Amino acid sequence: MEKSYKRHLITAALPYANGAVHIGHLAGVYIPADIYVRYLRMRNRDVKFICGSDEHGVPITIKAKQQNSTPQEVVDKFHLIIKDSFERLGISFDIYSRTSSETHHKTASSFFRKLYEDGKFIEKESEQYFDEEANHFLADRYITGTCPKCGAENAYGDQCEKCGSTLSPNELINPKSALSGSTPVLKKTSHWYLPLDKYEPWLREWILEEHKEWKVNVYGQCKSWLDGGLQPRAVSRDLDWGVPVPVEGADGKVLYVWFDAPIGYISNTIELLPDEWEKWWKDKETRLLHFIGKDNIVFHCIVFPSMLKAYGEGFILPDNVPANEFLNLEGNKISTSRNWAVWLHEYLDEFPGKEDVLRYVLCANAPETKDNDFTWKDFQTRNNSELVAILGNFVNRAVVLTHKYFSGEVPSHLKSELIDEDTLAQIPVLKKNIEDSLENFRFREALKEAMNLARLGNKYLADTEPWKLAKTDMERVATILNTSLQICANLAVAFEPFLPHTTQKLAYMLNMKSRNWDDFGSDSILRPGHKINDARLLFEKIEDEAITLQLAKLEAIRPKVIDEANEVAIEDKLSPLKDECTFDEFMKMDIRTATVLEAERVPKTDKLLKLLINTGLDTRTIVSGIAEYYTPEEMIGKQICILANLAPRKIKGIESKGMILMAKEESGKMRIVSPEEKLSNGSCIN
């Protein structure tokens, strides 16, 4: 039986304050978190929603250098942009603070100091690149050079943005300092490390045994890291921007941002509730949930819990970490450096009054189980065909007809028929479906069920046709419009977590003073004689011109995105057709869906991944040459299509049973073919 909690502490990943927020951040983290928090509040749960800007780290200093400004000026600018954008979209944080605050510096310093004094760190000396001209140790991002994997120039010391390979500075060919352009030298330096390996047995039990209910991608990525063996991780670095390391002999050293940032959840809670923050972080009756993107899974499931475990003093651990996958834009990965993104503050300026349209589209297309794609055409279609034509149309007709026939007063049930009872009986069923989906972080399903309530209303009006009956049977019209208005009132509750601006307008139209989840499912929210207000359009059609303008903005960027990110040359041609095969030959192939359970690199190879998959019929191993396109972490939880009856063969001594279906792009890059919607494992593809 699921545990009942006194309170719920919800955190959303701290956005990095070296740029604005884009639709990928919203779809992956902030909209799902806000939906869940609004739902809990409607259930009268005691909940706090915590977030703030992450304002330390090397990218901030790089941005300041590029703009000839200071790190503080950079974070001040973007903190305000991000905070204002969230408020305009309706993200309902209880507090949105920042890690450059005095409260955070004090909290982070105290956290480090306790672990230091308790002997929880180890100190190690290592060699790190040093710029003799600038007299400065260089963080990974301050070192550039030639990528050893693809030969691209200007790869960073931690990653090549062209081929996506993870690197270390000493792998770069001809490394250069980004500060002075000189060739750096290796110099010894000392840092403190959190020995994650010491917490590995505890993490295995806590995650792998106690939290098997976590999403497949979260559980799988954690298992992959644990199976690979954890290593000590540095908690300090040589930098002059951040929280200073609070011990003697640590001049020029700050807390590493991965250690510093999650403490921001605690410091922001302290700022919000200085006298009672501990009950939110140390009382077992509090349920802690982290909403994040998949790139933050390890930090929130392994690193931060290890920090809290090391600290002791009763800190609670996350009960769940509902992480989402990534959202792409018009077929390409969102890239902030290339400006291939839809920025929230720009959207809000260019589409005034359409905050909920973006919320709706990003939730309806949320990357919950796999990476998804945002397109402006889909945005337009969902607005015009769903929000306008279904939800808005039904509400408008119900309200307008009530004013036309009953002077804006809710009529009585005077002449019921079976269709009324059957229609109203479906509302509690839809409510239960929405609740089940929200409680299990299936926000797309929950939104779909809410829209099904609007579809129910539209169908009911179309089937009963009160405008025709008005000539002969006003008692029947009264019943139909009463039923329709009850559906409208239920919509004002059902959509509140998803579309807060819209439901506020709908509540005004219906003259509803309050909306409580307990009212949802009732067939008598609005009493006979209740006066409603005039109809207002909930949504407006989005014309082609607005979409053409947005696509034109992207088309001006696309060549650079394609050339730099995908290396697609204009003159490339598609592969020619292969020799003809017969229908009987094709029918011999058994192509099915499967889900990746585990993934790891095959030792001493650059291209091979070993995958453990669930085919619905069995669990088997496939070795696939996709390591240059996908990391093991990206593959875990991904649904794939496989040729299931391919004869087994040994690859590097591993028996591989099957082949993954892949698509080869013009550039030569390979992409996995996945179902558009998640299917049962073992579903046949014909």
Image: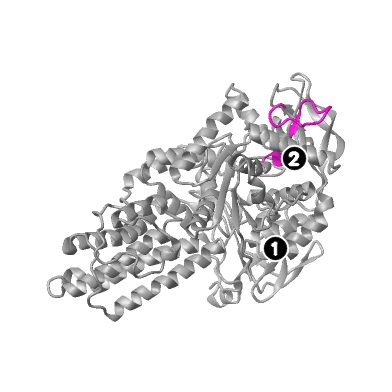
Q: CA distance from mark 1 to mark 2?
A: 27 Å
| Residue 25 placement (x, y as % from top left) | 54, 46
Residue located at (80% from left, 41% from top): 115
Q: Nearer the viewer, residue 139 or 562?
A: 139
Residue located at (15% from left, 75% from top): 473
How does the figure colour the protein chain or chains?
Answer: one colour
Residue 111: mark: 2
Query: Would you identify the image quadrant in which residue 474 lies?
Result: bottom left
Residue 673: within the magenta?
A: no
Residue type of the residue flagged with mark 2? Phe
Q: Which residues are magenta?
A: 240-261
Residue 661: mark: none
Q: Nearer the viewer, residue 649 or 399?
A: 399
User: Dot 1 corresponds to which residue?
Assistant: 211
> Which of the marked residues, 1 or 2, is nearer the chain's N terminus?
2
Q: Do callouts 1 and 2 mark residues in contact (Cβ within 8 Å)?
A: no
